[in-house]
Image (spheres, rainbow, N blue to C red):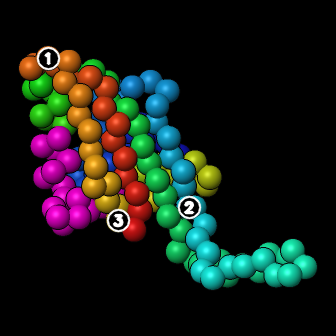
Amino acid sequence: MAFNGYFVKVGTYTIPLSLIRYGTYKCSPAQRQDLDSYVDADGYLHRTALSHTRTKIEFQLITMSETDFRGFMDNIVAQYTNGLERKVHLTYFEEEYGNYVEGDFYMPGTMDFTHLNKNLYDENRICFIEY
């Protein structure tokens, strides 16, 4: 499936491209994982590559009003499948193969939000890391 007008959908909430600051969207798709890989005494790498891969998605939000920011965050929080873990189900465009894939992700434990004043949020980083 070709690009369908969005980068990432959190549950049923499609994150509007207009909220993502231009040039900040980064997707690191299908990162390979190893288990107990090692380099032997002759310098050869012995890998045990795992079949499960992990993707990381991150971007900056645009500067926005408190009302717009609250709408964005309320939509994300409504999609949590586990609030304690900030676990969500994502559909995202995967550039390596040029199609949409799904997976379970979490939002990292530390989230920083910068206020410019009481009614305006600065650009804030949003990140999703696959389980």
Is 19 placed left or right of 23 in the picture?
left
* Label 2, residues with CA under 10 Å away: few <14, some 14-19, many ≥20: some
Q: Is residue 82 magenta?
A: yes
Q: Amino acid at mark 2?
A: Ala
Residues at marks 2 and 1, CA–CA distance in whole angstroms:
39 Å
Residues at marks 2 and 3, CA–CA distance in whole angstroms:
13 Å
Q: Amino acid at mark 3?
A: Asp
The residue stretch that appears in magenta? 73-90
| Closer to viewer: mark 2 or mark 1 | 1
Location of residue 12 in the rendering, given as x and y in whole percent from the top left corner = 23, 52
Residue shown at 49%/58% (left/top)? 55
Residue 102 appears in view:
no
Q: Is residue 72 above or below residue 95?
A: above
Residue shown at 27%/44% (left/top)? 111
Label 2 or label 3, whichever comes before in sequence order? 2
Q: Is residue 5 magenta?
A: no
Q: Quadrant of the C terminus?
A: bottom left
Location of residue 92 in the rendering, given as x and y in whole percent from the top left corner = 42, 51
Label 1 or label 3, whichever comes before in sequence order? 3
For residue 117, the mark is 1
Location of residue 99 in the rendering, given as x and y in whole percent from the top left corner = 52, 53
Is 127 placed left or right of 56 in the picture?
left
Q: Amino acid at mark 1?
A: Asn
Location of residue 13 in the rendering, given as x and y in whole percent from the top left corner = 23, 47
In the displayed image of the protein, which residue is found farthest to the right? 42
For residue 104, the mark is 3
Instruction: Please name the residue that numbered disc 2 is placed on.
Output: 30
Residue shown at 30%/32% (left/top)? 124
Is 19 placed left or right of 52 in the picture?
left
